Image (tube, rainbow, N blue to C red):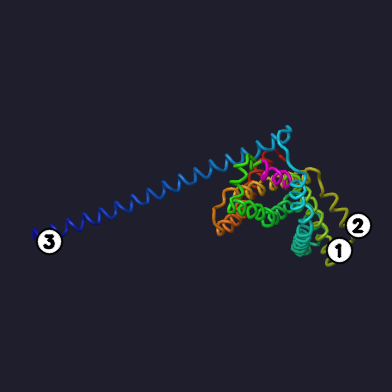
Amino acid sequence: MAQNTGCFLRSSQRRNTASSGRANNFIEDVGAWGICIFSALCRGLGFINAAFASVVRWVRGGVFVRRVDWWAAFDTVGPRAVLIVSLISFLIGLILAFVGAAQLKLFGAQVYVASLVAIAAIRIMGAMMTGIIMAGRTGASYAATIGTMRVNEELDALRVIGINRMDFLVLPRLVAMSVCMPILTLLADFMAILGGAAVGCGMFHIPLGEYTSYTIQALGMQNFLVGVFHGWVYGIIIALCGCYYGIYCGRDAGAVGVATTRAVVSAIVWMVVATGFITFVFEVLGI
């Protein structure tokens, strides 16, 4: 009996020790996760502060950027992105018009597809689709380019010779993206409306003059400015995410792929978050 009791006590102690070990490991994992999140948050806020401080210094004339760097930054964001943005936006407008007109036709109101496409495109869809395209195209390029420089120790070389990496790498890309994104958003709006007109006039036989009239009536200045503002915000988010993950990339070749993926995913997530926040604020303000 005593021997059985001793075995039972020892097994109970082992179970308690194992349970305590699992609990301690769980607490340690949660603590490590919290510390990691806090460190990443502090690092991200520090990066954003440094990026905007660089922009302020440039506006005040305290930063010199070579003309070739400006041309390269604007060429990547602007002319080379026109074709893909135009094509995708045209197809999005075509799809919106087809789906909307197919439903409105049941009530004999298919002519209102012009207003539907115009409002949806200029207020949010044009900016959102342009942002997603540029996140996958240019944001990934930023992360890959700067990440490769980090792997090749070029960022360390910039620090050694006294060149501020924020002024040299982040500033041109941030300014180019924030300037070109509203313009690309306007292009996307126009192409989406053109795609809607192709469906409305070509498939549902809406007279072109009538379609144009309803489109112009829907193009309010308020919706127009809201869409441009969204595009500007998306441009800043894409540039910051791409440059951040490039600068804080790992030291091996595989880390460049990881940084590129994280840059695209983070940019899209933060664009959605920014859209929700802006929509809430504009709803409160009655915009």
Q: How many neighbours does mark 3 have within 10 angstroms: few (below 14), some (14-19), or many (20 or more)?
A: few
Q: Earlier in the sequence, mark 3 or mark 1?
A: 3
Q: Check residue 171 for magenta coloring.
A: yes
For disc 2, the marked residue is 209
The picture places residue 200, in percent across and down from the top left corner, at: 83, 62
- In the displayed structure, 42 sits above or below 3; it is above
Pointer 3 and pointer 1: residues touching (CB < 8 Å)? no
For disc 3, the marked residue is 4
For disc 1, the marked residue is 201
User: In this image, 250 relative to 202: left or right?
Assistant: left
Query: Where does the N terminus fall, quadrant-wise?
Result: bottom left
Q: Earlier in the sequence, mark 2 or mark 1?
A: 1
Looking at the rendered structure, the kind of residue marked 2 is Gly
Label 3 residue SS: helix
Q: Residue furthest bottom?
A: 203
Q: How many neighbours does mark 1 have within 10 angstroms: few (below 14), some (14-19), or many (20 or more)?
A: some
Q: Which quadrant of the view contains residue 208?
A: bottom right
Q: CA distance from mark 3 to mark 1?
A: 90 Å
Looking at the rendered structure, the kind of residue marked 1 is Cys
The picture places residue 78, in percent across and down from the top left corner, at: 77, 52
Q: Which quadrant of the view contains residue 105?
A: bottom right
Label 2 residue SS: helix
Magenta highlight range = 167-177
- In the displayed structure, 223 sits above or below 88; it is above
Q: CA distance from mark 3 to mark 2?
A: 96 Å
Depth check, front residue: 222 or 242: 242
Q: Check residue 41 for magenta coloring.
A: no
Q: Looking at the magenta stretch, what is its main secondary structure? A: helix
Task: Please name the residue shown 69% across and 34% down the image.
Answer: 57
Task: Please name the residue shown 85% across and 66% down the image.
Answer: 202
Pointer 2 and pointer 1: residues touching (CB < 8 Å)? no
